[in-house]
Amino acid sequence: MNLRRNARDSSRERAQRALAHNGPSRVRLVSVLLVLLLTAAALGYFGVGDLTSAFTFPGRLTGAVLVVIAFTSFLGAAALVDHWLYRTFPHSGLVALLGTFVAFLADLTLFLELLSNADSISWKGLFGALTLGSAWAVYTVWRTLATIPAPKRVATALLATTALAVGNFGYQNLYLPSQREVRPVIKLTAGDPVLSPDRKAFSVPVQITLENHSDLSFDVLGTEFHAMGQQVPLIRQDRLRQEWRAVAEQWTSFEGTNPLSRRERYQPGDLVEAQPWMRYGDPIGANDTVSARVVVQLPMDTKYDQVAFYASAHLTRKDRVSLDQLKAATTGFKSWAGGRVPDWLKKRKDFDSLIYESTLHENNAIDEETRDTRHITVYWEFGAHGVDIVETVNMPDGKEAPGKVAERYGIRTVETGPVERTLWDIKSKL
């Protein structure tokens, strides 16, 4: 072992003496400088962007770290010139090695990030080349240094320990909190009915309240409230087993679910009233509460036995994505007048849609620069048998993005209902 170590050390010393005698190659100097300066420019570009425009504190912190790494790479380039040509500063070689090593770690991390998330081939190619170049630069600078003495080894160990501690702190206190699930709550409260002056109709006020108990803010993609009237005649004899099975078979979709009842025969519900209860694009602040009041009116001789109220809100998390103002779709605002609707949505029978769209902006400078611009399309559907809101995220070519993209952009659906009232209960309070 000692002979092998001595042979390795003597080989290293001979290489150092050869480099000192012949002088390092100017071509290698220019190559390493090019890698360091390109890394500093790219990281500085992304770092300043994140530092000034990222949506979250972890994003701003990432920008600050990238700016520091860019400065370290630039400092490493200056130290490399001194170490390679002048040797006026005794530790310039170690500073150059530190600069190239930090540049390599940053290039590798960004390259792996771009491989999994980016669309831009040019940015992937650039950071792939920089990763290989910085790895070669680390080896090249290391070859020009004498054996690292013990104090420098201690410093290296301290740097590694600090890096691990910073990484653990960032994961526990920055990453995990940003991934926690948050979802506002919608509450529906039906008030006392009011009889019309001519005693031929009555109205039921409904209070809709959205409560956001989190520290995050949201943007509204769309909201809907609708009331469904249903006839529920009573029968004299218990229902047969086959009829129970027929009702249970409808439970494949929530909208078609009716109770299993021994003496009640539920008819398909009819849409009585539907409307938005918040403007699309409105913000919902952290720990905010938003309320709206709608009124449902029915004639006194209505054929329905029960009325059910539903409300929903489709939101995006502001820490995940930013939206331009939602506007009527440029390809057509109405599905029945030429508006573009996905094929899978066309399969829903007897539904019409109003179509809105907006451009999505990523929550950090890296993704905003390296990912193709996505667009979100919101379909406000309505028909005789209910109301629904559907959103799709589309690529620049118009193709629909995979479903997991909705999770990336923090798209959330909050629903409540049915809140049911019998008509004789309502009429008894008039």
Image (cartoon, rainbow, N blue to C red):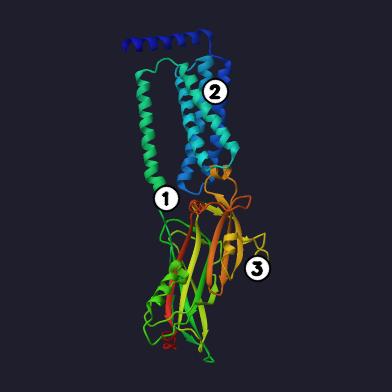
| Residue at image mark 1 | 179
- Is residue 358 at least partly visible in the picture? yes
Query: Residue 336 — which label?
Result: 3
| Helix, strand or loop under label 2 | helix
Left or right side of 239 for 85: right
- The first of marks 1 and 2 along the sequence is 2
Q: Where is residue 261 shown, x and y percent of the image?
A: 38, 78
- Dot 2 amino acid type: Val
Q: Which residue does the image show at 45% across and 25% down from the upper left?
A: 98
Query: Would you call the spot at circle 1 few (<14 residues within 10 Å), some (14-19), or many (20 or more)?
Result: few
Where residue 415 sits, quadrant-wise, is bottom left
Seen as rendered, the residue at the extreme left is 1
Disc 1 residue type? Gln
| Cα distance between the residues tagged 3 and 2 | 62 Å
Q: CA distance from mark 3 to mark 1?
A: 40 Å
The amino acid on which the numbered mark 3 sits, given as a three-letter code, is: Trp
- Residue 344 numbered tag: none
Q: Is residue 330 left or right of residue 57?
A: right
Q: Is residue 99 above or below residue 337?
A: above
For disc 2, the marked residue is 32
Q: Residue at x 40, y 9 (%)?
A: 10
Across and down, in percent, residue 26 comes to 58, 16
Q: Locate the C terminus and report the quarter of the image it occupies.
A: bottom left
Q: Toward which corner of the image does residue 370 lie, by quadrant?
A: top right
